[in-house]
Amino acid sequence: MPELLTCTPERRAEPAPPRLLRFLRPLQVEDPWALLGSRHLDGLRLAAWNDPTEERCLLAAGHARELWPTGPERFAQAGAAWRDFEAQRVELRGAGPAEPLPFALAGFAFSPTPRRSAAWEAWGDGLLWVPELLIQRHAGACWAALTVPAGAGADAGLDRLNALLDALLAEARPPAAPRLASPRAASALSERAWRTWRQGVLDAADALRGEDLAKVVLARAERFESATGDFDPLATARLLRDQQASCVTFLVRGADGQSFVGATPEDLLRLRGRTLHTVALAGTRRRAEGDQDAALGREMLSNDKDRREQRHVLQAIRDALAPLSEQLDVPEQPEVARFAQVQHLRSPIRATLRDDVDVFELLARLHPTPAVGGLPRTDALRWLEAHEDLDRGWYAGPLGWIGPGGGGVFVVALRSALLQGPLATAFAGCGLVEGSDPRAEWVETCQKLEAVRSGLALG
């Protein structure tokens, strides 16, 4: 793992790292993802992001600066490093898009732990990085940002990145239609998996009858195996983008080729200036044909269990934001949000923040929401540590980008899978409150897992 940058007085006494030179270059590219499959990106850290809410599509490759935060203070570490990164940035081109391109990307595990599973060991507790090459299409225009450390090698570094970009542009072509993998489940449909899940829900029910827990979110993993070749992370991301058109689709690929990919319906935060948008999301029903689809949504709106679960999420977000906000707007009633395979209860929330609040303080306040952890947060996380036999890794953690000045977007990394070779490990969870039924909650996780399974693709 790369050297950890810390924020101790000893580290600050060392010489400051070189400033970051950032060159902006306009492009004529309709879809940055058309550049993803180039062999010139092999061996580089790679990220892709498609956000239909903002009509923002980007890819990023390599890293000019990075931080691997660890432990309970990882958001504070990332915030301190971000301020250092931002202070070191120098734009080399005056002209550019009206809205600055994202400057750094970040992803975090659901929870920090020194006992990472082998599958997630390379991902750590989190990662903040400034990509060397970032290409974005937004607001009808496409730009590239090339970032290198200042110093004697800066010109050569920019020449190298411009040559890489030229090679990507020369090879750009519409991707071939992905081949559906139709993988079989390697483990999750076994009787043992069901018994483990059932016992977890029953244990949660006992805890929920006490005075400490109001809700806990239990998750499980399902392992899929391809018999006809390796899963292709890029083809999978493209297929998920097509299938889950209203979700944020994401891909993070390590230099070793291991990839985390998904299409999530849940925003954690959207920050522009002092204005914050977030959502309270809870409750799940499948999609159906015709009138039955609307009937399922109405049933969810009137269901006591789903409404209680959604109110828990809403109240927790309200309590987290109130100390940071000058104004907080919360709707009285939730709406039904419909996605490709499932529908949820959703309440959009808007806040006007104090001047001194940054994105990393918001992450520390909001993550994990009761939609992925439980309530009260500390008690729910303690219960999960003792009872959930699963390293979630980056599943259900915050993933997103930060722009110059500190604004940005983070989502909750749901409907996601870790891919390596012919194996894909997908994750899903559901909120348990008093009265939750093990069989019904199992079915809910199956519906969520199907959204991932149906998007797995071969190259």
Image (tube, rainbow, N blue to C red):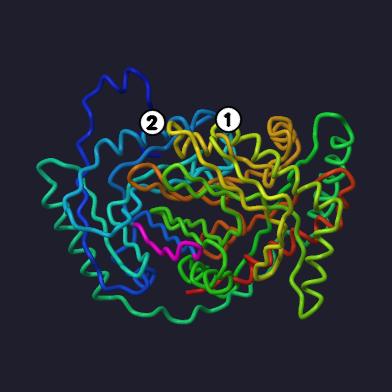
Looking at marks 1 and 2 on the same chain, the residue that comes earlier in the sequence is marked by 2
| Image mark count | 2
Q: Position of residue 326 (x, y in %)?
A: 53, 35
Residue 287 picture quarter: bottom right
**Residue 324 sits above or below residue 155 on the image:** above
| Dot label at residue 286 | none
Residue where numbered disc 2 is placed: 80
Q: Amino acid at mark 2?
A: Ala
Residue shown at 56% from the left, 39% from the top: 327
Q: Position of residue 339 (x, y in %)?
A: 65, 67
Residue shown at 34% from the left, 62% from the top: 136
Looking at the image, residue 442 sits to the left or right of residue 150; the answer is right
Question: Dot 2, crowdedness within 10 Å: few (<14), some or many (≥20)?
Answer: some
Extent of the magenta region: 52-60
Residue 217 picture quarter: top right
Is residue 270 visible in this depiction of the protein? yes
Residue where numbered disc 1 is placed: 323
Considering depth in this image, is 9 or 345 the residue closer to the camera? 345
Q: State the SS at label 1.
A: helix
Find the distance from the CA under tag 1 to the CA under tag 2: 21 Å
Residue shown at 44% from the left, 36% from the top: 358
Image quadrant holding the N terminus, namely top left
Q: Are marks 1 and 2 in contact (CB under 8 Å)?
A: no
Question: Dot 1, crowdedness within 10 Å: few (<14), some or many (≥20)?
Answer: few
Q: Position of residue 335 (x, y in %)?
A: 71, 59
Q: Amino acid at mark 1?
A: Pro
Looking at the image, residue 280 sits to the left or right of residue 433; the answer is left
Residue shown at 30% from the left, 38% from the top: 85
